[in-house]
Image (cartoon, grey):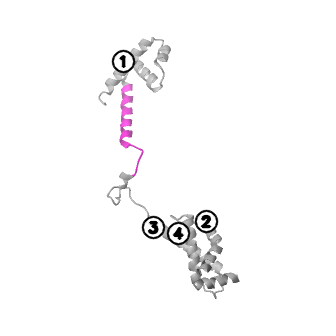
């Protein structure tokens, strides 16, 4: 305790080595206090620096004749500074519109990269709707062969075996189904 009072006297007289020694001694306390707080926009290192600044200010403003121990005084000063920083960080409103312009005059919405392509998605949905409607207009046998070959990805040979028809007949049925499907989709294409 006596050693701390001597360091405080030297620090108040402007001796930087004494201030540095006080910062080293209180470093553990500052780190522990920093772990208990979150200040928006501050990293752990930033908070430790804020704590050290508060400690240095506390050294300068501490009354050596006070009955109040310096350790408690420093802890209180650091806490008050952290609370002040938290209050001031919550008062700052950091929002902007995606339609606001940057220095070059470009809107942020135009600069933000997107992996979505709304037009392609919309056209794809429209195409699927038209395709579904066109398949719905096909005859039952034509519809089944289109679904078998292109939705279920099964071979024409398997289709012919299942329906007990020749492979050539299955090819003709698929050709006719594709022809009719193309005819129904001509308006869309």
Q: Residues within 10 Å of mark 1 (few under 14, many from 20)?
A: few
Q: Which residue is mark 1?
A: 176
* Front of the two marks 1 and 2: 2
Q: CA distance from mark 1 to mark 2?
A: 74 Å
| Residue behind mark 4 | 86
**First in sequence: mark 3 or mark 1?**
3
CA gap, disc 3 to disc 4?
10 Å
Q: Which residues make up the magenta segment?
A: 112-135
Q: Is residue 176 visible?
A: yes
Calculate the distance from the C-alpha at mark 2 to the C-alpha at mark 4: 14 Å
Label 2 neighbourhood size at 10 Å, few (<14), some (14-19), many (20+)?
few
At x 61%, y 75%, the residue is 23
Q: Which mark is residue 92?
A: 3
**Tag 1 or tag 4, which sits nearer the N-term?**
4
Q: Secondary structure at mark 4?
A: helix
Q: Earlier in the sequence, mark 2 or mark 4?
A: 2
Examine the structure image and report whether residue 132 is included in the region drawn in magenta.
yes
Q: From the image, which quarter does the N terminus lie in? A: bottom right
Q: Position of residue 97 (x, y in %)?
A: 38, 58
Residue drawn at x 54%, y 67% is 46
Which badge, 3 or 4, comes first in the chain's sequence? 4
Question: Is label 3 in a helix, a strand or a loop?
Answer: loop
**Image disc number at residue 35:** 2
- Please provide percent x and percent y for residue 120: 37, 39
Tell which of 92 and 19 is nearer to you: 19
């Amino acid at each position: 305790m006596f050693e701390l009072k001597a360091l405080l006297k030297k620090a108040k007289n402007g001796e930087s080595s004494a201030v540095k020694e006080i910062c080293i001694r209180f470093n553990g306390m500052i780190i522990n206090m920093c772990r208990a707080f979150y200040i928006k926009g501050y990293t752990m290192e930033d908070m430790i620096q804020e704590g050290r600044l508060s400690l240095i200010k506390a050294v300068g403003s501490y009354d050596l004749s006070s009955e109040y121990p310096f350790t408690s005084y420093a802890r209180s000063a650091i806490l008050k500074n952290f609370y002040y920083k938290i209050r001031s960080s919550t008062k700052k409103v950091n929002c902007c519109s995606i339609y606001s312009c940057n220095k070059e005059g470009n809107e942020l919405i135009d600069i933000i990269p997107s992996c979505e392509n709304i037009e392609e998605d919309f056209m794809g949905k429209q195409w699927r709707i038209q395709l579904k409607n066109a398949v719905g207009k096909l005859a039952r046998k034509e519809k089944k062969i289109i679904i078998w070959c292109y939705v279920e990805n099964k071979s024409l040979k398997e289709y012919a075996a299942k329906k007990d028809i020749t492979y050539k007949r299955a090819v003709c049925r698929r050709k006719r189904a594709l022809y009719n499907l193309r005819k129904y989709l001509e308006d869309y294409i």
